[in-house]
Image: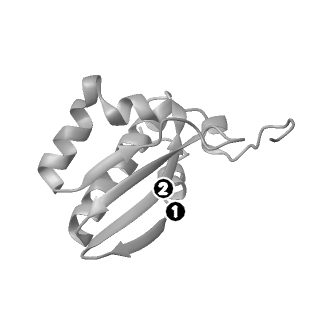
Amino acid sequence: RPSTLSWASCRRLQAQQVRTGGAIVLVATVPSRAVGALVGPGGSHIREVAEQTGAEVSFARGCIVGTNDTPLSICGSGRAVASAALWAAAVVQGLVDAGRLLPSDLRFVPTTGGGA
């Protein structure tokens, strides 16, 4: 049964698109708790998506300072980037539907504390 949080995946994939040469670079954020499911064991999911779509998918090494979000970069042709972005949205939505992501994982909640 679909979750009432179906909007969450789309909201998370609001992103910035930059055209570099012939490639498009899409930068989005995903909940850090979703990164493992997106990467897969030993990077198997990312490799599979790269093979199927032709897009290059990568994640930042850590969260955006003050959040629980991790940047996701997708680079390739327009079709490749769109396909990989839809895959990422489907994975995040599946985690929501399975109860593995909570509403608190899908909200921007800046952390408090001193900055450098």
Compared across the picture, whether 4 is left or right of 36 comes to right
Q: Is residue 25 above or below residue 100?
A: below
Q: Residues within 10 Å of mark 2 (few under 14, many from 20)?
A: many
Going by the picture, which residue comes out furthest to the left?
51
Q: Which mark is residue 51?
A: none
| Residue 85, percent from left and from top | 34, 56
Is mark 1 in CB contact (under 8 Å) with mark 2? yes
Mark in front: 1 vs 2: 2
Q: Residue at x 37, y 31 (%)?
A: 37
Q: Residue at x 41, y 37 (%)?
A: 1
Q: Is residue 93 above or below residue 77?
A: above
- Per the image, the residue denoted by label 1 is 14
Q: Secondary structure at mark 2?
A: strand
- Per the image, the residue denoted by label 2 is 28
Q: Earlier in the sequence, mark 1 or mark 2?
A: 1
* Frontmost residue, 96 versus 18: 18
Q: Residues within 10 Å of mark 1 (few under 14, many from 20)?
A: few
Compared across the picture, whether 69 is left or right of 108 comes to left
Q: Residue at x 55, y 46 (%)?
A: 5
* Residue type pointed to by label 2: Ala
| Residue 67, percent from left and from top | 68, 41
Q: Quadrant of the C terminus?
A: top right
